[in-house]
Amino acid sequence: MIEGVEIKQLTKHADERGYLMELLRCDDAIFRRFGQAYVSLNYPGVVRGWHYHKKQDDHFAVVKGMVKVALYDAREGSPTQGQVDEFFLGEQNSILLKIPVGVMHGYKTVSTEPSLLINFPSEPYDPQQPDEYRLPWDTDQIPYDWAIKMG
C-alpha cells in the first residue's frame, strides 16, 4: 500500500429501525485534524480525477452506491513513489480511506445508481488559494486505466 494511506473498517450497527455507522471520530488514530466535511453526488461512470493536495489529507467514505478510488504516489523521495493502488468503497465495502498529502487521487462511480461520497479534509477549502493541483482524468503521466476490468 502507498506510504501514508490508511484504512478504517466501518461498522454498521443495525436493528429493526435501520443502522447507524460512525464514519470518523476525533479520537481515531487515522485522524489528524478537522477542516470541513462535504458530500459529493456522483453519476454512474463519471471519473473525478486526478488531483492532489499540498496541505490536506482527505478521508473518503461512500454511504450510497459504490466507488472505485485510484491513488498514485508521485511524491519525490517516497518509498512507494510510482505505485498505484485501487480501493472500492461503498455499500458493499464500508471503509474510510485516508489519502495523505501529495498522493494523486481520483474516483469513479461503478454502481448503477449515483454514489454519495463524504469527505473529511483536514483543511477547509480556500477559494482564494485552492489546495488542488490537477491532471486530466486520462493523463498518460499516471499508469492507470479507469475502464472496468472484466475477467
Image: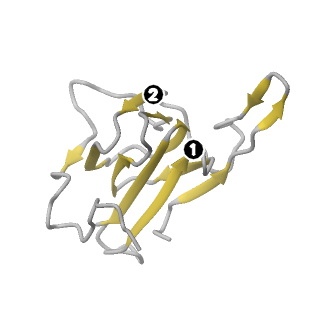
Give left or right: position of 62 versus 22.
left
Q: On the image, which quarter does residue 148 sit in?
A: bottom left
Q: Marks 1 and 2, how far apart in space?
A: 20 Å
**Residue drawn at x 40%, y 75% as measured from the top left:** 80
Residue 4 in the image, given as x and y percentages of width and height:
50, 62
SS assignment at label 1: loop
Q: Which residue appears farthest toward the bottom when viewing the image?
A: 79
Mark 1 residue crowding within 10 angstroms, few (<14) / some (14–19) / many (20+)? few
The image's mark for residue 98 is: none
Say if 143 sits above or below 120 in the image. Answer: below
Q: Nearer the viewer, residue 99 or 29?
A: 99
**Residue drawn at x 38%, y 69% as measured from the top left:** 150
Q: Nearer the viewer, residue 33 or 68?
A: 68
Residue 113 in the image, given as x and y percentages of width and height:
43, 35
Q: Nearer the viewer, residue 136 or 146?
A: 146
Residue 36 in the image, given as x and y percentages of width and height:
47, 27
Q: On the image, which quarter does residue 27 sit in?
A: top right
- Which residue is tagged 2? 39
- Which residue is tagged 1? 32
Type of amino acid at the residue the image marks with label 2: Val
Residue 1 in the image, given as x and y percentages of width and height:
50, 71
Type of amino acid at the residue the image marks with label 1: Arg
Mark 2 residue crowding within 10 angstroms, few (<14) / some (14–19) / many (20+)? some
Q: Earlier in the sequence, mark 1 or mark 2?
A: 1
Q: Which color scheme did the rendering employ for the protein?
A: secondary structure
Say if 89 sits above or below 4 in the image. Answer: above
SS assignment at label 2: strand
Closer to the camera: disc 1 or disc 2? 2
**Residue drawn at x 22%, y 67% as measured from the top left:** 142
